[in-house]
Amino acid sequence: MQNRFWKAVEERDSTFDGRFVYAVRSTGVYCRPSCPSRRPLRAGVLFFDNAVEAEKAGFRACLRCKGKPAGESLGSRVCRYVDEHLKDESRITLAALSAAFQVSPYHLQRTFKRTIGVSPREYAEARRMGLWKSRMRQTGPTECRDVTTALYEAGYGSSSRLYEKASARLGMTPAIYRKGGAGMKIEYVISDCALGRVLVAFTGRGVSAVYLGEDDGVMESALHSEYPRAEIQRGHRSEWVTELLAYLKGKHRKLDLPLDLAATAFQMQVWAELRRIPYGSTRTYLQIARGMGRPTAARAVARACATNPVSVVVPCHRVVREDGDLAGYRWGLARKQALLAAESR
């Protein structure tokens, strides 16, 4: 890992800004990887996850690059800003964000999408949807269960905005989601594959679940538990199912299926980062967290991997521990090992 960081310093690679800072023993300062100052000797360089850790070790920020700030990426700062202003949509437009962070709209959009995986607008909508879902699922006697109250608490200006965004994000209206998917139509197919049995569920918008196992009943039960009142029935092999099965047979290396998932903004970020891992490669939970601009979120990344409902399509099997151990896998370590072995060939 340190060799990779040093290469980023040598190349002044700005894509690593926010993932780490490097400190120079001889000068007592720390810098971003893209700092324009003269490159130090490798023997005198230390690497830290962020500026806070560097400052705890006694280093101070470089006067040229400033450490930007506390080693935090632009994407992370924009995320925090959006979270704080969800209820004021005028403050989280692209124009407003570029003015607040004193960068061009193009630079902000490109940098944010590279580090977070979605655009600022998509991030804001996902955060609102996540908050709304959380409020609607609360079951305490004094908790809000009313769609209208919950939508305003989540930052939606009107019910029409919520219904418009829910259609794209959930594949159903808010009322249907609240009722456990009542009225929603989900088809699924179960087939043999190289890893045992696979269940593929889909709506008219995309793939909603890919479960691996041996027991058809267990996989069907897991699908029904997410939408207990949805209209779920066996269907026929669609184009998406055929493509997935061909992928599992090793007929091609690229799998880019449309997804129809209900997820939090953080889960979406993690899953987007996982889909960027090249075929045949692996990443650690920490690398994924750093790639998102959130170097302290490795455990949260692991939880998002564990809740991934579309195995293989979102390749959580490509994530391993720092020591190279395969760690856990929702569908069994033997399958994870088999997937990685097949890709390595």
Image (tube, rainbow, N blue to C red):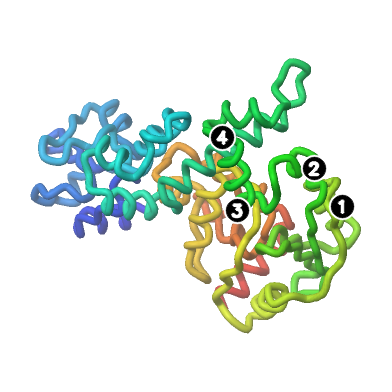
Identity of the amino acid at label 4? Ser
On the image, the x and y values in percent for residue 141 come to 78, 17
In the image, 245 versus 82, the foreground residue is 82
Q: Are marks 4 and 1 in contact (CB under 8 Å)?
A: no
Total labels: the figure holds: 4
Dot 4 corresponds to which residue? 158
Q: Quadrant of residue 24?
A: top left
In the image, 89 versus 207, the foreground residue is 89
Query: Could you classify mark 2 by the number of other residues whose Cα lies within 10 Å: few (under 14), some (14-19), or many (20 or more)?
Result: some
- Residue at 20% x, 30% y is 59
Give the foreground label among 4 and 1. 4
Query: Could you classify mark 1 by the number of other residues whose Cα lies within 10 Å: few (under 14), some (14-19), or many (20 or more)?
Result: few
**Which residue in the rendered view is the most extreme toward the bottom?**
251
Q: Are marks 3 and 4 in contact (CB under 8 Å)?
A: no
Q: CA distance from mark 2 to mark 3?
A: 17 Å
Dot 3 corresponds to which residue? 168
Dot 2 corresponds to which residue? 180
Q: CA distance from mark 1 to mark 3?
A: 26 Å
